[in-house]
Amino acid sequence: MALVEFENFSFRYPKQKNTLSNINLDVSPGEFVLLCGPSGSGKTTLLANIKNEIKPVGDSEGTIYYDGVDIRNLEEKRSASEIGFLFQNPEDQFVSDNVLQEIAFSLENMGLSTGEIRNRVAEMAAFFGLDKHLYRNVSELSGGQKQLVNLCSLLVLKPKLLLLDEPTSQLDPIAAYDFLSILRRLNEEFSITIMATEHKIDNLFPFIDKAVFLEDGFIKYKDEPRRVCSEAWKNDIFRNYLPSVTRIHFLLQSKYQSPNKVEIPLNIREGRRYLSLLNNQLEEIPRAQLNGGLKLNEALNSQNSLDKHSKVLMECKDVWFGYLKEHIVLEGIFLQVKQGEFLSMLGGNGTGKTTLLQILSGLLKPQKGKVIHGKDLTLGYVHQNPLIHFHQETVEEELMELSAEFPEDKSRSTGFLGFLSEHSSSKKATSSVNRRISSGDRSVFEHEREELIDLFGLSELLGKHPYDCSGGEQQKIAITKALLTNPDILFLDEPTKGIDPMSKLHLADKLKKLQEKGLTIVMTTHDIEFAAEYTERCVLLFDGGLQVDDTPKSVFSNNNFYTTFVNRMVKDYLPDCITLEDVKEQWMI
Amino acid sequence: MKLTIIHPAVYVIYYLLLVILAFLYNDPYYMISFLICVSALIMLQGISREFKNVIQFFIPMSLLIIILNPLVAQVGTTRIYVLGSYFITLEALVYGILMSLSLLIILLLFASYNRAVSYQEMLYLFSKRFPHISMIIVMALRFIPLLSYRLTEVNKISRFNQENQGNQKIESRVDKIKKTAQMLAVVVSWSLEESMLTAKSMKARGYGIMKRTSYLSYKLRKIDYLFILVISATTLICTMGLANGFGRIEIYPTLHFSVHESMFNPYYFSFLILLLPLIYLEFKERLIWH
């Protein structure tokens, strides 16, 4: 019998169209179900509806059964202890400031005796290896540990069903991987039923039992992962959601005949086995020749690109920074930012990516060392949490705000597009001329804003409150707002955090366009795939220093673990390929 | 690391008694022995840094008291002429010194108390009686650092915007206040937004559906009973002494105090004994763990 059963379930927020329509879904005990879909497709709403305590306000039709009982009639105690809900942001779920108290919190709520509470905390803390950290302050933990504490605090209640809302979206790749393997253990060894939503599914896909793809509140696909893959591949949008391994498989399949019927590979091991089946055919591609040609080309290209960006916009020299004397984050950083490049900074949680970005953008002053940049350089900065940039009632006001404050005699205001075309000359010339033609400026500025709004597709959001927009939309609004100041360099702090694959594609597309027009972009990210695909230079922070500083290709092709899935799969054949595009090019698919 | 383990309630009672006594006594002998014992306790507890902080705060404070009291209060019979016909009284001076001494003792007691009883133990004592208040305190303790983090971030952004949007340097005060208000509004709405999540997470984990229990539990042990016995007996004797005027000297209107007066009476000894048990326990632990 199903543990959770949706029967013709529909849900609608007040005064809006259906967020969920006609959902029919069975989840058996011990199943691992993955929900994916674009943001706004109703994944989170679906999960939240299973949990009475946090069920969103709105009208619903149909019923959800939990263990045969209508979930709305489930006893409070049962709902609280048997169904655990893990939120996206590890930070906001904490109630108290130390680990032990946080884990014990849910047990204390249940009114258990002190002895029982201690037993359960002891068991769980040992299982998760948190026993060393029991008395630490939660703010001292890394992101992965925080999420573990949160999970631990749910598991002490011995839940039967875990609902996870993008649990790893805020974690760095390694921490995310660790977290997922713990989920896998919980599912396999303790048969806890898990329903999770996630955007980065490469790590998750191999061990789920059922994948559910949602689109506009309807269930689009709902099946065992392999079958879902072959269905979703036919859809232009949903193919982007599939794991890289599977996508390579489908690409190859369209061109090469596999010797016998193989099942669709989901993880790297299966992917490699599939490649070895195709071994002979792949060998036949005149790769050696082609490769050589390409390599030469590439070398030339990279030479070119280096020359192209020869002008150094910003430089930091021997920068040291630490929040505490005992813990120094940056130890003597040398870094140059060149005109027109797209630079990404990678590294684990707490290696100082954000700190370095804030130092570069002038938000923080280094304790030792210097950041040198030209005097008339304008900078744009978008914080990790875009909320920080908003203080108006609507998105439109948010974007208008700048023009209201726009000083009449502002010297650099030729407009983003204009200024890009004649960068060097305009700067000096405009300062004297512009003073007199300020009204003309204003219209240029208006025009430019329209253009940016168009580019980012914000026109539909203009009337909304910024807090009501989704994470991806907020990110775009914040970026637009930063661009309105005509920055020469745009600093982005984890712009892809919690954004679904399609929006990420759009965002990357837009950033690329801006970059082509001459904008310099510096960003921190956890997203290896994103960095590999779109940036030109990667900087890897480790142990207070810049460990690697090179093109993404050479950074990732050298790594065995910290690299893209594509690279991990095709390493034996095409060691230089790190993105799907590279593979397509090389194998001519 | 805190080594001496006594029931937090016993600690609370003990420190409360000491603070009250610090108010009541004003005999220099008592005060000085009090000060020495409390300092010794702080040293043993290993919080010399806090000791320094207390002193830093205390010195200007005590100077103020010592100087101001005789200037303002000209009661007392023993006049000391300072400038021509302007005089201060010896009584007022002595009173000021003794008052600042008792202030110092109380400050040190609080520092030591902070070390001895962690806030979690305090909460434990509270939570039996007032579960919701203790929960609010816990959440506030988590919230304060978050708020300060958010404030610094918003502040950074605001300064950044100012620099990069080329705003004029000269700003009127009204503008500045407006800016600050705007910044605070951002912090508040941001915090509210995120607190919604915290509230959800609390609800999801079953907060409020049942009477809360506590992870912490302390049992009264033999040492606690002994401790209570010692301090209640000695306090009783001390109070009797106080009622008979031992430990208090007469300052106003005329100072009655002689250095040669013998201090060796049972009341003084019982006061010393009252001061010692915690020092003894800390010292014992020191010897074991060194």
Image (cartoon, rainbow, N blue to C red):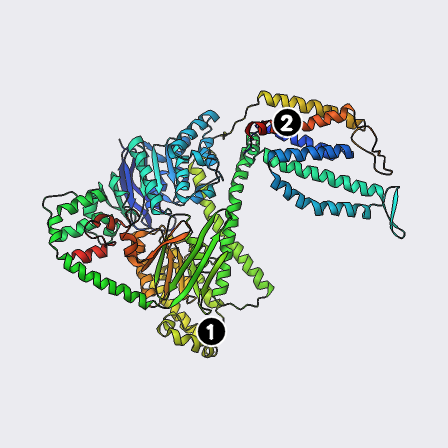
Front one among B50 and A451:
B50
Q: Is residue A248 above or below residue A446?
A: above
Per the image, the residue denoted by label 1 is A411
On screen, residue A406 above or below A498: below
Q: Up-down: is A334 above or below B123?
A: below
- In the image, B144 versus B225, the foreground residue is B225
- Percent position (x, y) of residue A187? 30, 34
Chain letter for mark 2? B
- The residue depicted at 61 percent of the width and 33 percent of the height is B44
Residue A480 placement: quadrant: bottom left
Residue A470 in view in this figure:
no
Q: Position of residue A268 (x, y in %)?
A: 23, 44
| Residue found 70% across the figure and 22% down from its top | B233
In the rendered image, residues at marks 1 and 2 fall on the same chain: no
Closer mark to the observer between disc 1 and disc 2:
2
The type of residue carrying mark 1 is Ser
Q: Amino acid at mark 2?
A: Tyr
* Residue B280: mark: 2
Drawn side of residue B37 relative to residue A31, left or right: right
**In front here: B49 or B271?**
B49
Q: Is residue B7 left or right of residue A552?
A: right
